[in-house]
Amino acid sequence: MIQRHNNFLPNELISNIFSYVKDNMKKNTWYTNISWQDTLVNKSNQVSMLLLSPFVEDIKRCYVQLDDTYGDYNFIAQFYVWQRGSHITWHYDNDHSFGSTIYLNKNWNRNDGGLYMYEEDNQIKAEEPKYNTMILNDNKLYHSVSMITNTAENVRTTIQVWGDERK
């Protein structure tokens, strides 16, 4: 089951993350979806990614407020910029205990794509990006992101978070 949590991150944390992203715009700290498996990329346009290491503990605290067992997890957090024409094909996040997306666009038109799609109970369902909403997939559901249209007004920005139980 997918969980949805609105107003997930404190506004100050979002502001600090955007400042960090801006400070890193011209630094050699970014990488792209070229590092993904070919089956995930499947002719997608570029997705740019920046590790959010300085904010992992702050982000983790927000998850622990939902469920204190997340305190026992290792977290990875990345800022993603989804360019027009980018998407990710259907896949499982089998390498992680959970995966989640936090949407950062203040306004997003569902006609611009970028929907988080998942299969549950033999049905395909979708979540449209809503600012500061976190979508949590902790059941390893089959999922994808629909292509950002070439006419989208903006690029799509998200924070991708994965958690792994400590061993």
Image (cartoon, rainbow, N blue to C red):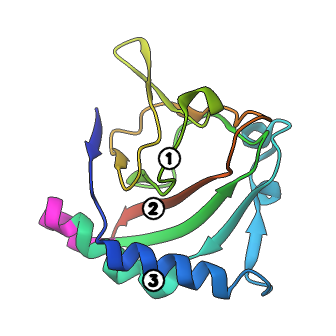
Q: Which quarter of the image is occupied by the C terminus? A: bottom left
Using residue 85 as the reference point, say whether residue 136 is left or right of it.
Answer: left
Q: Give the number of the mark in front: 1 or 3.
A: 1
Tell whether position 4 is magenta: no
The residue at 41%/12% (across/down) is 123
Assess whether mark 3 and mark 1 are in contact (beta carbons under 8 angstroms): no
**Residue under circle 3?**
16
Query: Please, is residue 14 above or below residue 157 in the view?
Result: below
Q: Which residues are magenta?
A: 64-73
Using residue 116 as the reference point, say whether residue 29 is left or right of it.
Answer: right
Quadrant in which residue 145 is drawn: top right
**Residue under circle 2?**
161
Q: Amino acid at mark 1?
A: Asn
Q: Amino acid at mark 3?
A: Asn
Can you tell which mark lies on residue 107?
1
Taking the image as drawn, is residue 167 in sight?
no
Q: Earlier in the sequence, mark 3 or mark 2?
A: 3
The residue at 76%/70% (across/down) is 31
For label 2, count other residues whose C-alpha is less than 10 Å away and answer few (under 14), some (14-19) or many (20+): many
Q: Amino acid at mark 2?
A: Val
